[in-house]
Amino acid sequence: MIKLITFLGNYGKQYSGNRHNTAWIFSESISACANGSWQSKFKGQFLSESNISNEKNPYTYYLKPETYMNLSGDAIIEAAHFYKIKPEEILVVHDELELPVGTMSLKWSGGLGGHNGLRSTKANLGTADFWRLRFGIGRPDHSDIAGYVLSDFSKAEREILDKIFPHGVELLEKLKTTEPDKLLEQYKKIVEK
């Protein structure tokens, strides 16, 4: 079962609409996250949601590291150690250059694709064996990747994200009661335009 859902992003108002903050933007679509009482904890914003009907997984924990992207793993490892959560019980939500805007993908383990937040998570957990929920941001037609991921989505791109996010919300609801490997085929790649 997934016990900890972490949204990778950069802390600060100037980053709020950035492509690199896709996970934080997505979190606003989740009822528990939008209406919950976040606490400053584990080097970030932390939220605990009770899953009353599920004895095997009584709580889902949400974390938005405020360490900036490159040190995301510092926050994740603190929460994981405190609640004795194994890497395979962690879902990291992040932006993905290799997928076009409007694409969502559930993935187990694998490479890091140059993503500094994933690199930090792997370094802190000591393994790449954790779940990822990837939202496509597309690859730019120029070589300034850093500038691209730190730029804001266009209005048209935000409208596409608004169409794909409900699939992510649906997946997170299912993960409260279902092992992620049973959902992998269904959520391996979903595309909205």
Image (cartoon, grey):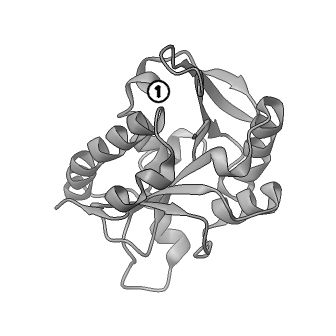
Q: 137 above or below 125?
A: below
Q: Position of residue 31 (x, y in %)?
A: 38, 24
Identity of the residue drawn at 46% across and 66% down:
96
Identity of the residue drawn at 47% across and 48% down:
23
Occupied quadrant, residue 2: top right
Q: Secondary structure at mark 1?
A: helix
The residue carrying pointer 1 sits among few (fewer than 14), some (14 to 19) or many (20 or more) residues within 10 Å by Cα, namely: some
Can residue 8 be seen here? The reply is no
* Front residue (pair 4, 114): 4
Identity of the residue drawn at 59% across and 27% down:
57
Q: Quadrant of the C terminus?
A: bottom left
Q: In the picture provided, is 164 more to the left or to the right than 177?
A: left
Q: Position of residue 44 (x, y in %)?
A: 69, 34
Q: 167 above or below 124?
A: above
Occupied quadrant, residue 35: top left
Can residue 86 be seen here? The reply is yes
- The residue at which mark 1 appears reads as 33
Q: Position of residue 26 (x, y in %)?
A: 40, 43
Q: Amino acid at mark 1?
A: Cys
Q: Position of residue 59 (x, y in %)?
A: 59, 23
Tag count: 1
Q: Quadrant of the N terminus?
A: top right
Occupied quadrant, residue 12: top right
Q: In the picture provided, is 126 more to the left or to the right than 113?
A: right
Q: In the picture provided, is 149 more to the left or to the right than 67?
A: left
Identity of the residue drawn at 32% across and 57% down:
186
